[in-house]
Amino acid sequence: MQIMTSKGPVMLDLSFIQEIKKRSGQAIELCYQCQKCSSGCPVAEHADYHPNQVVRMIQYGLKERILNSSFIWLCSGCETCGARCPNGIKIAAVTDALREMAVKERALSGEKNIPLFHNAFLNSVRRDGRVHELSMMAQYKLRSRTLFADLDIGLKMFKKGKFAFLPKRIKRLKEVRQIFKEAAKQ
Amino acid sequence: MPGVFAGGDAVTGPKTVIEAVAAGKLAAESIHQYLQGLELKNTFKVSEEKVAPLRFAGDEIPRFEPEPVSCAEPVERAKNFSEVSAGYTLQQAKKEAERCLNCGVCSECLECTKVCLPAAIDHSMSDEEIELAAGAVILSPGFEPFDARLRQEFGWGIYPNVLTSIQFERMLSASGPFQGHLVRPSDKTEPKKIAFIQCIGSRDSTDKGSEYCSAVCCMYATKQAIIAQEHVPGLETAIFYIDVRAFGKDFEKYYDRARLEHGVRYEKCIVSTVRELQQEKTLRIKYRKANGKFAEEDFDLVVLSVGLRPSASAGELAGRTGIKLNEYGFCQPDEFKPGCTSKEGVFVSGAFCGPKDIPETVVESSAAAAHASCLLSTARGSLTAAKEYPPERDVSDEEPSVGVFVCNCGINIGGIINVPEVVKYAGGLRNVKYAEEFLFTCSQDNIQKIKERIIEYGLNRLVVASCTPRTHAPLFMSSMREAGLNPHLFEQANIREHSAWVHRDQPAAATEKAKELVSMSVAKACLLEPVATSFIEVNRRALVAGGGMAGITAALSLAGQGFDVYLVEKEKELGGNARNLFYTIQGNNPQVLLGRLVNQLQENPRITVLTGAEIKEVSGYVGNYRTKVKLGREIRELTHGVVIMAIGAREARPEEYMYGEHPSVLTQTELEHKIVGNELPGVKNIVMIQCVGSRQEGRPYCSRICCSHAIKNALKIKEINPAANVFILYRDVRMYGFMEKYYKKARSKGVIFIRYDLENKPSVTASGSHLTLQVNDPVLGEQVSLDADLLVLSTGVAPRSDNEKLSWLFKVALTADRFFAEAHMKLRPVDFAADGIYLCGLGHSPKLLGESIAQANAAAVRAVTLLSKDRLESLGIVATVDEDCCKGCGLCVAVCAYDARYLDRENGMIARVHEVLCQGCGACVASCPSGASQQKGFAKQQIIAMADAALG
Amino acid sequence: MKNMSLKFTGQNPGTALLSFFRALLTEKAVDSLLVPQEVTSKNSVVSTLVKEADRIAAVAPLAPVSLANAARHVSDLTFTDPEEKIGVVLRPCEARALVELVKLNQASLDHLLLIGVDCLGTFNPTDYSRMAGKNLLTQDVWINQAAKGENIGTGNVTIRHCCRTCDQIVPENVDLTIGWVGLNEQFVISMPDEIASMLKENLALEEIEMPAERLTLIARLKENRAAEKERVFHEFDRKFDNIEALTAELATCLRCQNCRRACPLCFCRQCVFEGPVFDHEPEKYIKWASRKGIIEMPTDTVLFHLTRLNHMGMSCIGCGQCESACPSELPISIIFRAVGKKVQDLFDYIPGKDREEKLPLTTYKEVELEPR
Amino acid sequence: MVKTILKQFGIPEERVWFRFISASEGKLFGETVQQMVDALKKLGPNPLKMQWEI
């Protein structure tokens, strides 16, 4: 069983869906392709695949393609799809599961910078219990090697006092760190 | 009582203070007169004042802003105490008063009781509890539409131009809020583009909607789109859908017409949200197109195809009657007992059993009636009373003496036509003895008055100038019988539809036309002659043609209702297609049912089963058929009064996908045999193709059952071997109603559904025992190739070749698809156009076993409506023959569509009329060159008299 | 079927015919015979029903005159079962009329032997009577002069114009045909085998091949007449394309209804125009006149012809009896034939052609639902 | 048939209409009547009316 893609035939893997189901807790197989998710998705137009296609690819087990897709990283997690899905499938949760899998399997070729941004964001939270925009951006810009992009916006934001110089820590930082620890365990 | 005076509300009921004061003064004056010993001038009397007309209907009154009260300028006001507000002038006051709509929120002023001349309003009425003794109860509380507010993303209740389908249906109606004009509620302009969004609240597993499919929305949206286009030429319509479920009889044809003839656009995509452009109130919809691109389109109106919810009273009703409801709150009957509830003697019908269209509703209601009729068969007729009429007066020697009654029909006629003028005119016509005007001629008291006038004035002809005879003629005619006149000495002039309604704008001309219509009717009435109806005896035995599940059910129902039945089956064995069904999607076993029913058949003394029997010849007519049946070498003649056609159908034979060429290619029925016979070891990959030969040239209709057949088998395979891979290649998944549940179940079990379209059919190749399917996946736009150990074809239902012969033998019609054609698609789904012949089962159209059973019971009870009569009465307005003129040419016999004309060769070749069969269509009258054939009540002279009266 | 030659060399053709018809009765091929015979004054030919062979004296089925379409007589004889075998002699137009009457249940073929005769046309009865009285035209004279297809018509008196445009010379749908056109001193009678064997000895019949010259002559005559018919119909169409021409032509109609009475197909016991529908009250005439200002008396003249066209135009077999019967010499026959033809063409219907063909009124095709 | 006959008698065939309209096609019936009335108004009075006959 295979599917003819533009890059040649790919074998179907009908068991892949079980893994994603487990990771996301979503009954993906219930999809009847009404496309309501895609119609309402704010990022689908800008991504290589649309939510309904991602669901179908999971059913076919086109793992490599999904993990390398830009969609899983472009998804802003607004959850419009899940809120509207008549079959109650929360695609945002599916996307999260796929991101995790992509990070784990280092299949980051789709949108490299997005995982970098995610990491920078999470690192900042881990450190301070909340985001410190300046250090997060510094980390992100360094790693993504786009040091001078958006510099003008950054300066404007700085002038308006949107960036604090020093990070502010929250009171119960310990608990946040505990969350990170627990998550890493799984 | 002398010396006692009264006034106020105690006398008049609630009234205004002013009236109370007036009454008090009146009383005082009367007391004064009384005490002075004068004659009392004022006795109490309910005054008949004129009441201003209600004026809040429609746009009768143009909208006016309130009349501003003129105030003095501030400069003028300074330093004085003069009146600031000048108040209204007389003219201004009148103008302001004109704005009053007299809307009359009820303050119990009882003005309404005064203006209602027939005194139909009674404010003192209160709820009453009535106890009825009944042997059976049929529950049909119907359904409620889904509350569109629950799916707020579509903006219903927020954006004025988003409507539910129910609102839209009202808008399309002539009696609707805009008199049938299709306009946007926001600005009353005609829309140019309308979007319909399907499955609102249906096929929705979240807590907002209902899991099941509402079964009717695809077709009603299609209908509304077509009708909307007829309302507004050039209108564009688009329907956003998941699957188009055009599964009913001839529905696919309608869907085809919508797309191909009317250009209704179908977009296979459900939209996520409807946005409103605030200025224009236009609605913007973003959706994913079939080619994977996104589109944004603006629509003037958006119609939400809301689904069906159980009736709000369903729960309470279930509680009181002790019946069980299903998980959705509907009273879903057992699969094999449609119309029955969990409680004996309580039956159900209609949308209360689950969402369904009109034909199914009518069928299921009739089925419920059949069950009740079986239960109560011994009591049949015990509560009916025959009406007694006085003997008919012989008017043959009397000169015509016509009474004309002109109806106002409230304001329907009287508002346009000058009725008193028509009455005066009618009174002056030749032979008119009496003319009178009524507010509502059909009201009980006026019917009584008509009877009195007939006797008082010795009238012998009656003309009522009112509405259509279709609805009211029987009422007036029966009043004539009660007054001792032959009811056919009646003529009705339709001055409402034919004049008042159509010439609303020209009251004077409408009045003239009404006069002419009346004079025509009078001219005809003068020539009317009494008509005697005739009767034939009814042979109270039924013939059921076909011994499948439908035929068996119909025969058992008829016997249960107390009638003898011949059950004729062509094959040696009973059961028909049911013999190939081993389990249903709901998990029941048809074989068990079949075995039980066959036993019941054999034990029932009322039923004669003839197997291996072929119908050879049919003669006779309703109530008295003679059918020759060939049993082996013997020919047996059966006499019976009615026929139930339960002919069945067959599984179509596939002609594609290597069927018959490769051993691993099967039909669904063949697969079912293999599953039951446990013949599928080692089969891992199974591919099913839907709509094989269906919904395309050759067999353009949808076979309705194939989707559930495939899913049923897919679920069975998954049950036996959860590791099996099942793919179903489909065009639309038509799992209507509660069956949606099983579609969902199949998906949850991992059955993969891949959609294909006619331009991109799957293809199959074989190498050895191995099959490979190529199919385009439209979601990804890529070609998928699937390995298949088995390829199963859902091939649909085809009509039997016998249908042609039987349609000819019984003189009943076939549809273009060669199934039997019922009398009316929606309202008479088990009747043929001719009386005395009924149909059910697959011969009518493809359907599920339970649906066949329902239809069989329905056909049986319809047959009983005829069988339970001991004689049939003719119509009255039947054809008649002038024997002196007739030369027996037989043209009338040849043109009669009802077998009502025949040549009497024994008595000098005269064409005669079977009055009971005659439908009064007049074809024979038109064909007769010598004028020997005439129609009672429509004789040539009568028609010419009308024409003369009209032309002057 | 056998073609049997009945020679009349050296004797009158009439004598040979007489012996043939006598033999039919004596050999019991038929129980009775409907056959035209000369009246004693010899100036006309009438239909007779003969039961006794001896009483046949002057059979003249070939004399070019026809007072009435014999199909009407056949209808009278077979409207109900006559219970004996009747031989009836028919010209082609009469055979056609009979076919139509059978379709209308007005006659039955069950007990008939249909004897068809060649026909080259008939004269108006008055013309024939005048000429026959002077012995200028009798059956024998006619056979002699017309058998070769020449001299059809005597001097400036010709056969009725309806016959001049009739292209059926040999009848169809008959059991037995007496052929004389294109033959010399003999009749060739096509008859069923069993009748041939009955009569063979008595009449010294001889079986022969149908002579070729007969077939050629008939083909030629048919062609000429078909062309003539075409021309006449065409001329009619040109002339009567407007209401004025037609009303002018019908202006002398007396409404005597002779046309209807002469028509073999107008089978009604009572014409609707004689019935109560057209019995008007005096006040009705006055009413009409006051509405229109003026009306013609009697009324309904055009309506009468229109109605008759409507009732039997479809079946008109063109025998021309209506026209012969018309005292005003209206060209009714041509009107009925030409308009009838158009109506018949509409339904692909040829009246008198085939007993099995259904009357258009009694059948229905789905295309008829489309507006034309 | 009626059209053919009437045409010969100088009554134009546009004056006689035949349409198959089922009992359920009220709308079509209404439209057809409207069309026919319009068409007849355009054609003007029947030429036969000029004659004396009825």
Image (tube, rainbow, N blue to C red):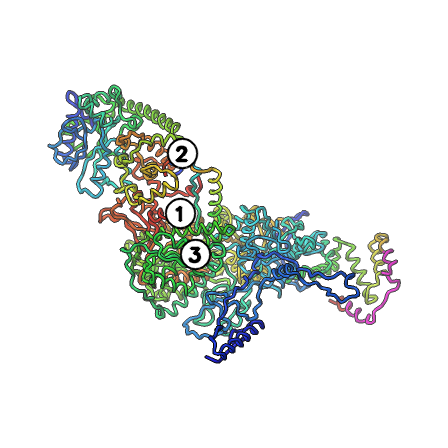
Q: Which residue is mark 3?
A: B466
In this orientation, which residue lies closer to the viewer: C340 or C307? C307
- Residue C14, compared with residue B672, is above or below; it is above
Name which residue lies at 30% across and 59% down: B535
Mark 3 neighbour class, 10 Å CA radius: few under 14, some 14 to 19, many 20 or more: many
Q: Amino acid at mark 2?
A: Gly
Marks 3/1: CA–CA distance? 18 Å
Mark 2 lies on a secondary structure that is loop
Q: Which residue is mark 2?
A: D10
Q: Indicate whether residue A178 is drawn in magenta.
A: yes
| Chain letter, disc 1 residue | B
| Figure quadrant of the C terminus of chain B | top left
Q: Which percent across, then down, holds residue B531?
A: 31, 56
Q: Which percent across, then down, holds residue C276?
A: 29, 45
Q: Amino acid at mark 3?
A: Ser
The magenta stretch spans which residues? A154-180
Q: Which mark is residue C112?
A: none
Q: Which residue is mark 1?
A: B950
- Residue B588, compared with residue C4, is above or below; it is below
Asked if residue B167 lies left or right of residue A68, the reply is: left
Marks 3/2: CA–CA distance? 41 Å
Q: Are marks 3 and 1 in contact (CB under 8 Å)?
A: no
- Dot in front, 3 or 1: 1
Asked if residue B889 lies left or right of residue A130, the reply is: left
Q: Residue furthest left?
A: C54
Q: Amino acid at mark 1?
A: Ala
Q: Is residue B810 visible?
A: no
Marks 1/2: CA–CA distance? 26 Å
Q: Earlier in the sequence, mark 3 or mark 1?
A: 3
Q: Indicate whether residue B495 is drawn in magenta.
A: no
| Chain letter, disc 3 residue | B
